[in-house]
């Protein structure tokens, strides 16, 4: 058979497991369906909302280190350290909750508008 210590060879007779059926090709003259267009529109609106939320988070929380840098040295004035702890420990959480609530309300409104549009298109 073979030298001792060599692995045994196996023969694969079936089709490879990674082969997938070909996707159907859509002709360029086929108009997109109303549902596909509405879905793309919803995805664009949700992406725009997510990017604007990210921008607000960066603007509000990402710029805090620069604002803290402008405060007086906590070694000379202990009020500066108190302000930092108050902003990070108290004020940041309500701001995050308000931003989160705003995001959820807007995302649900986007989905509701898309569902209403799809319902009107079906009629």
Image: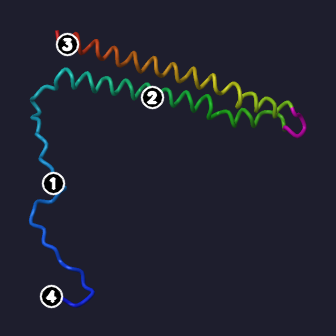
Residue 87 location (% of width, % of height): 72, 28
Magenta-highlighted residues? 74-78
Say which quadrant the N terminus sits in.
bottom left
Q: Which residue is mark 4?
A: 1
Give the label on residue 121, or none. Answer: 3
Circle 2 or circle 1, nearest the eye? 1
Residue 92 vs residue 80, the one in the foreground: 92
Q: Which residue is mark 1?
A: 19
Predominant secondary structure, magenta span: loop
**How many angstroms separate mark 1 from mark 3 (CA)?**
38 Å
- On screen, residue 105 versus residue 56, left or right, reads left
**Farthest-out residue, bottom:** 3
Circle 4 or circle 2, nearest the eye? 4
Query: Element type at marker 3?
Result: helix
The residue shown at (25%, 85%) is 6
Q: Earlier in the sequence, mark 1 or mark 4?
A: 4
Circle 1 or circle 4, nearest the eye? 4
Residue 45 location (% of width, % of height): 37, 23
- On screen, residue 85 versus residue 123, left or right, reads right
Q: Which residue is mark 2?
A: 50
Vertical placement of residue 4 versus 96, above or below:
below
* Occupied quadrant, residue 12: bottom left
Circle 1 or circle 3, nearest the eye? 1
The residue shown at (35%, 19%) is 111
The residue shown at (30%, 23%) is 41
**How many angstroms separate mark 1 from mark 4 (CA)?**
33 Å
């Amino acid at each position: 058979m073979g030298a001792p210590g060599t692995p045994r060879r196996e023969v694969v007779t079936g089709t490879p497991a990674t082969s997938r059926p070909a996707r159907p090709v859509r002709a360029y003259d086929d108009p997109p369906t109303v549902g596909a267009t509405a879905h793309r529109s919803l995805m664009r609106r949700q992406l725009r909302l997510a990017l604007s939320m990210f921008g607000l988070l960066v603007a509000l929380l990402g710029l805090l280190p620069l604002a803290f840098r402008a405060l007086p040295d906590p070694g000379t004035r202990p009020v500066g350290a108190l302000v930092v702890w108050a902003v990070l420990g108290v004020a940041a959480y309500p701001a995050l909750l308000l931003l989160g609530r705003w995001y959820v309300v807007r995302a649900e409104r986007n989905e509701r508008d898309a569902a209403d549009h799809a319902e009107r298109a079906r009629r």
